[in-house]
Amino acid sequence: MSNPSHRPIFHFVTPDPHPSPFDVNMAVDAGFHVTCYTHVSLAEVTGLAQDAVFSRPPDAAPFTCLFIGGRQIGLAMDMLAAVKAACVPPFTISAFADPSGAFTTAAALIAAIEGKLRPHHGTLNGKKLAIFGGRGVVGGLAGVIAARQGARVTLVGHSSLASVAERAAEYLHYFQVSLAVADGGSPAQRAAILAECEIVIAAARAGAQVLTASEIKAAKNLLVAADCNAVPPAGIDSVGVFDDGVPIPGHENRALGLGALAVGGIKFRTQHAMLHDLAFGGVARHFDFTDALDFARQMVAHK
């Protein structure tokens, strides 16, 4: 770039002890020069943002991006709000909140599910959706996005229903969406949940299988089963990591499977497109999960 002050700079800000190598790699591949700040508190974000804002002339400010990582959805949204408040037009930098990659992953997941539903079953509006592993950030944010599209979402816990209920209360506070909670610790409890749902998501920790093939086959109303786990064993026994709308073996309604790497491909392209837009668009943008969903839908539409 001919003007040195227009070089894209990516400031990785996280409350965690270290930045995510995945996000750093993505930023470098998108064309950013990267710096990292760890153990950052909410109170420190304003100062960091203002230092980034006023260190470049107004026309160069949009080429500076403050990326918010970490593992807490609510804190990431608060940090994003702090960056916006710290900007003094025309000194306005870009910002991108994507804690643990949850915003782009959840957006890719929901966009992929929408794409499989659309030809024969319409939209998510009114659909019953259960998320096994709802305590985690990807599962929880997928529930928030789906609920905002009109789905009837249940977050399912395995070991602690109280912790899942705490997450649902947090999402109600931040996003004004109401998510039901359920205990899926026993086969009978899982069967009762699956008997009702049309869409199921497995978003538990890597390497944890939460649903068996027989449990999926018995879910008579199921339309789509999506698995976020790429580490063996699969989170859903009957869904392969590369499955991209493959009918689930033995399911009488031919429910479609979405594997982790099929969703991951959409997530990768979504995040890269968003970062490239911030690096070279020349306009300050503030991205959160709503923007990630818009980008992910474009990736699905042009796949």
Image (spheres, rainbow, N blue to C red):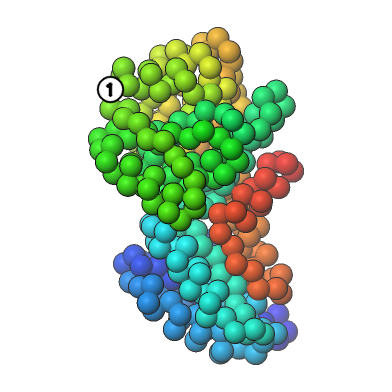
**In the figure, is residue 266 to the left or right of 218?**
right
Q: Position of residue 200 (x, y in %)?
A: 48, 29
Q: In the picture shown, does residue 298 fall above or below 99?
A: above
Q: In the picture shown, does residue 169 fall above or below 52?
A: above
Q: Position of residue 61 (x, y in %)?
A: 63, 82
Q: Secondary structure at mark 1?
A: loop
Residue position for label 1: 186
Residue 146 makes an appearance in the image: yes
Q: Looking at the figure, which quarter contains the C terminus?
A: top right
**In the figure, is residue 130 to the left or right of 253?**
left
Q: Residue at x 74, y 43 (%)?
A: 302
Q: Please tell me which residue lies in front, 69 or 33.
A: 69
Name which quarter of the figure residue 287 lies in.
bottom right
Q: In the picture shown, does residue 119 fall above or below 63?
A: above
**In the figure, is residue 168 to the left or right of 240?**
left
Q: Amino acid at mark 1?
A: Ser
Q: Residues within 10 Å of mark 1 (few under 14, many from 20)?
A: few
**In the figure, is residue 139 to the left or right of 85?**
left
Name which quarter of the figure residue 290 lies in.
bottom right
Q: In the picture shown, does residue 180 fall above or below 5?
A: above
Q: Residue at x 53, y 77 (%)?
A: 85
Q: Residue at x 71, y 47 (%)?
A: 298
Q: Residue at x 40, y 63 (%)?
A: 75
Residue 142 makes an appearance in the image: no
Q: Position of residue 275 (x, y in %)?
A: 61, 63
Q: Position of residue 116 (x, y in %)?
A: 64, 30
Query: Number of marks in the image?
Result: 1
Q: Looking at the figure, which quarter contains the N terminus?
A: bottom right
